[in-house]
Amino acid sequence: MHPAFTQAAFLTSAADSRGLPPDQGNEVAFAGRSNAGKSSALNCITARRKLARISKTPGRTQLINFFTLGDAETSRARLADLPGYGFAQVPQDVRLRWRGMIESYLQNRRCLRGVVLVMDARHPLTAFDLQMLEWTGAIGLPAHVLLSKADKFARGASLRQLASVRKALPAQVSLQLFSAQTAQGVAEAREKLSEWLQLK
Ligand SMILES: Nc1nc2c(ncn2[C@@H]2O[C@H](COP(=O)(O)OP(=O)(O)OP(=O)(O)O)[C@@H](O)[C@H]2O)c(=O)[nH]1
Ligand SMILES: [Mg+2]
């Protein structure tokens, strides 16, 4: 593992495009439905249990939270924890605002190298997951899917789910099983991030 992962630090939170850190270096965004396990995946990948806030209340992360990897002063590698989408109890106008914010971030962020799309392995391929893949596909942005909470399945069942989701995804989208609870798949996820973030 590249040592930069465990030197992760919180950088800033953005409520809109004006709050984004300077558009330079390399950034990877974690997207996914509320409660899919984005923040947990981030914490697992950085081996920092309290880096990104985890909550049992979906829709908690309403800002884009940025984390630097490596030495915070000189870091050119960042992870962005996007607000979760598709939380039913959130009013329509709030949902539209989130959607607008994510869409504009994806389309305008020049330092963005790829999107990690986190899907609860038990409930993959929601309408918004497909929308996200359409956006990334349309702008030629690489996407990597984490089928999270794989620990909720027996091994055989998780492999069957992996194969079934694979078939539903565009060929250029990569996919893996992941569990923040058992750290299953963490090495594979770090490898993808190292490549995108050009960690050497
Ligand atoms: N069993 C299991 N539970 C997980 C895993 N990852 C996340 N969870 C649980 O799922 C819930 C949501 O996790 P979060 O990481 O906060 O999800 P999120 O996608 O960041 O959610 P929002 O910030 O609301 O969009 C928490 O109760 C986590 O403990 C996992 O790999 N296995
Ligand atoms: Mg979160």
Image: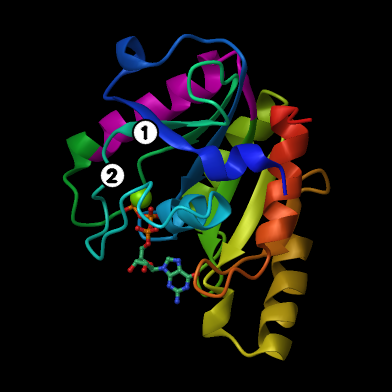
Instruction: Give the residue pinned by disc 2.
Output: 61
The residue drawn where x is 43% and y is 35% is 9
Query: Where residue 22 sits: x, y (%)?
Result: 46, 9
Front residue (pair 75, 35): 75
* Circle 1: element type: strand
Q: In which quarter of the image is residue 159?
A: bottom right
Q: Which amino acid does label 2 sit on?
A: Thr
- Is 96 magenta? The answer is yes
* Three-letter code, disc 1: Asn
- 31, 42: nearer the viewer: 42
Residue 55 seen in render: yes
The residue lying at 49 percent from left, 73 percent from top is 181
Q: Residues within 10 Å of mark 1 (few under 14, many from 20)?
A: many
Q: Of discs 1 and 2, which sits in the foreground?
A: 1
The residue at the point 31 percent across, 50 percent down is 53
Q: Residue 169: in sight, yes or no?
A: no
**Camera-side residue: 3 or 109?**
3
Residue 139's quadrant in the figure? top right
Magenta-highlighted residues: 95-113
The answer to the question of whether label 1 and label 2 lie on touching residues, with beta carbons closer than 8 A, is yes
Residue 114 pos. (x, y %)? 65, 33
Instruction: Kindly identify which residue carries mark 1.
Output: 65
Membership of 33 in magenta stretch: no
170, above or below 22, in the image: below
Mark 2 residue CB less than 8 A from any atom of ligand 1: yes
Residue 51 is situated, as x and y percent measured from the top left of the image, at: 38, 47
* Circle 2 crowding by C-alpha within 10 Å: few under 14, some 14–19, many from 20: many
Q: Is residue 51 above or below residue 122?
A: above
